[in-house]
């Protein structure tokens, strides 16, 4: 049997944007189903069972945040939110509500396709599956069983907190992770407002793992949102 073609659901009301998304996705071998409103979109999620959802935050009938919350009640399908500039706060809220990643308009085809590839890769191993024992990208290699970190052939010695932070980033590798999510996963729910912890520890990690900590290539900053660990 031929491998199935991934189905992408577009929930977006702007015809021009939909045209661009549809054309790009079809040209790259995806099947596309479309919805122009939140109501239609939610019906398609349940009815068509797509592999990835592209969700515009500015929909005519309901807020995209409500749609995210609603989808997360019954499905773990990756959600990539599409936001306009100036919707930074909504974007972060959507991620904290369980969206997987985001794209800010305007974005190009290669960015769109990269986000979808990462989302599909992650949904192939749903939450709860044991992680790969070794994570590797560029010069970085992390043995998650032995809790050992290497840069090239040299071992990098991380403090327990630095290691926890890196492990959290690895769990979300390729996708953005918000400040709030990181603080919660590494320090716990009482620390979600302590962004300065993150700045300090991220600087330490970069110092130990990046060849040029001032121009990070592995651990990148997503301004106003969070961080992303490259995974390819
Ligand atoms: Ca819109």
Image (cartoon, rainbow, N blue to C red):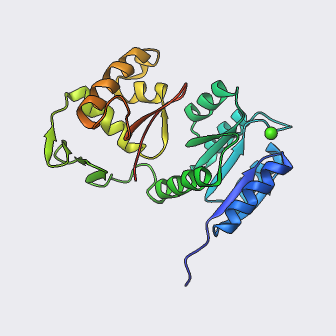
Q: Position of residue 150 (x, y in %)?
A: 19, 44
The reply, left or right, for residue 225 in relation to residue 204 is right
Left or right: residue 136 compared with residue 104: left
- Horizontal side of residue 158 vs 30, given as left or right: left
Question: Depth check: 187 or 227 in front?
Answer: 227
- Of the 4 image quadrants, the one containing the N terminus is bottom right
x and y, in percent, of residue 3 in the image: 55, 77
Q: Is residue 186 above or below residue 75?
A: above
The residue sitting at 40% across, 15% down in the picture is: 196
Viewed as shown, does residue 90 lie left or right of 189? right
Question: Which quadrant of the render holds ligand 1?
Answer: top right
In this view, the residue in front, 37 or 221, is 221
The image position of residue 126, as x and y in percent, is 46, 53
Classify residue 55 by image quadrant. Answer: top right
Q: Please, which residue is most extreme toward the bottom here?
A: 1
Which residue is at a point 54% across and 28% down the rendered structure image?
225
Number of numbered tags placed on the structure image: 0
Q: Quadrant of residue 191?
A: top left
**Does residue 132 sit above or below 2 in this rendering?**
above
Q: Residue at x 63, y 67 (%)?
A: 28
- The percent position of residue 219, horizontal first and vertical second, equals 38, 36
User: Does residue 209 appear anywhere in the picture?
Assistant: yes
Residue 91, image quadrant: top right
Look at the picture and state if 150 lies above or below 197. below
Residue at point 30%, 55% (across, down): 132
Residue 49 can be seen in this image: no
């Amino acid at each position: 049997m031929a491998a199935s073609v991934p189905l992408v659901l577009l929930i977006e009301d702007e015809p021009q944007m939909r045209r661009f998304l549809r054309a790009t996705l079809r040209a790259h071998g995806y099947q596309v189903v479309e919805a122009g409103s939140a109501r239609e979109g939610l019906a398609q999620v349940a009815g068509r069972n797509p592999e990835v959802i592209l969700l515009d935050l500015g929909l005519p009938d309901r807020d995209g945040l409500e749609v995210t919350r609603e989808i997360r009640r019954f499905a773990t399908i990756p959600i990539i939110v599409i936001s306009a500039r100036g919707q930074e706060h909504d974007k972060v809220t959507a991620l904290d509500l369980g969206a997987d990643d985001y794209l800010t308009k305007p974005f190009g085809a290669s960015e769109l396709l990269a986000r979808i590839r990462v989302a599909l890769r992650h949904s192939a191993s749903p939450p709860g599956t044991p992680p790969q024992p070794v994570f590797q990208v560029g010069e970085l290699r992390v043995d998650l069983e032995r809790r050992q970190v290497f840069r090239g052939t040299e071992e990098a010695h991380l403090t327990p907190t630095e290691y926890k932070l890196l492990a959290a980033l690895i769990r979300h590798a390729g996708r953005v992770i918000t400040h709030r999510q990181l603080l919660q996963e590494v320090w716990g729910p009482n620390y979600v407002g302590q962004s300065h912890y993150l700045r300090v520890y991220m600087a330490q990690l970069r110092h130990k793992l990046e060849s040029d900590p001032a121009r990070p290539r592995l651990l990148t900053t997503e301004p106003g949102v969070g961080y992303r660990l490259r995974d390819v």
